[in-house]
Image: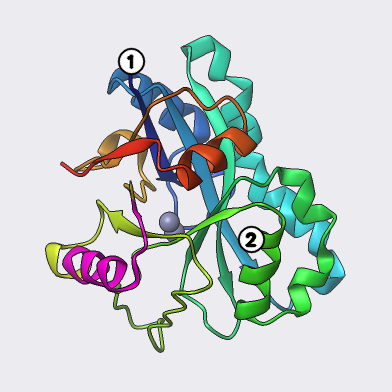
Amino acid sequence: MKYLFETHCHTSESSGCASETAESAVKYYKEMGYAGLVITDHLGIGGKKDHWVTHCKNQQAGYLNGKAVSAKYGMTVLYAAEITVGPHWGNDFLVFGLEPQWYWEHPELDDMSLNDVLKTVREAGAFVSHAHPFREANYIRSIVLLPRLVDGVELNANRDDFVNERAEEYARAYGLPLTAGSDNHVAHRQSRLFGVYFDELPTDEQQLAKLLFDQKYTLKTE
Ligand SMILES: [Zn+2]
Ligand SMILES: [Zn+2]
């Protein structure tokens, strides 16, 4: 038995760039034969000090809505964050394995450099996958590669072959495992779906990280 999971999905409750709610996403992935999804809304780090907890709770609202309807759809819904750290905006890292409250309890993240944020979340037990590392966009001023501060490299359904081939080369060069996700911002209007087939069903964030660390999964990249 394999358990297909979406590992990169946004909700309109928490990500300004997303257009569909968590419930639409849960419903859609059920219809598409997935066993679960990890909701990975954007969490910008840097300059949020005065309202850090509110900032975190806004990022977690979509996940909570998804979790609330998970039983209704027979889906497993887990929490993660896609972090970007100033001034390296647009260099995105998927942080798997930490629970929502971990972020509220660590406002010091907001004063840290990207390197120190990655060190801190990994020391807390997270598995970090560098999301679409070779994405090019006007707002991304430079590509930042930190191969010794991540645990994996992502293949992304919303990026073209060029970007994903470079990600594969990067992973191979540094002996890093690949993950796969769709970066879905639009639920049922997503044109192609990636994901991972887990060997066991992860029922909480810690188990999710453990399965990733132990490489107990295969990729869905078509
Ligand atoms: Zn987005
Ligand atoms: Zn994303």
Q: Amino acid at mark 2?
A: Arg
Q: Quadrant of ligand 1?
A: bottom left
Q: Judge: label 2 CB < 8 Å from ligand 2.
A: no
Whether 203 is drawn above or below 157: the answer is above
Q: Estimate the x, y position of residue 149 in percent, counting from the top left.
A: 53, 72
Q: Which residue is found at the position 82% from the left and 61% from the top?
A: 106
State whether residue 89 is above or below residue 64.
below
Whether residue 167 sits left or right of residue 104 in the image: it is: left
Kindly identify the residue that appears in the image at 85 percent across and 55 percent down: 105
User: Which one is earlier in the sequence, the residue at label 1 or at label 2?
Assistant: 1
Q: Secondary structure at mark 1?
A: loop
Amino acid of disc 1:
Met
- In front of the other: 178 or 61: 178
Are the residues at dot 1 and dot 2 in contact (C-beta closer than 8 Å)? no
Question: Which of the 4 quarters of the picture holds residue 104?
Answer: bottom right
Rendering quarter of residue 219: top left
| Residue labelled with disc 1 | 1
Q: Report if residue 148 is visible in the image.
A: yes
**Callout 1: 10 Å neighbours few (<14), some, many (20+)?**
few
Quadrant where the C terminus sits is: top left
> Image point 32% across, 47% down: which residue?
182
Is residue 44 part of the magenta span, yes or no? Answer: no
Gap in Å between the C-alphas at discs 1 and 2? 29 Å
Figure disc tally: 2
Determine whether the beta carbon of the residue marked 1 sits less than 8 angstroms from the nearest atom of ligand 2.
Answer: no
Disc 2 on helix, strand or loop? Answer: helix
Place of residue 32 in the rendered image (x, y in percent of width and height, measured from the top left)? 27, 23
Residue bounds of the magenta highlight: 164-178
Residue 122 — which label?
2
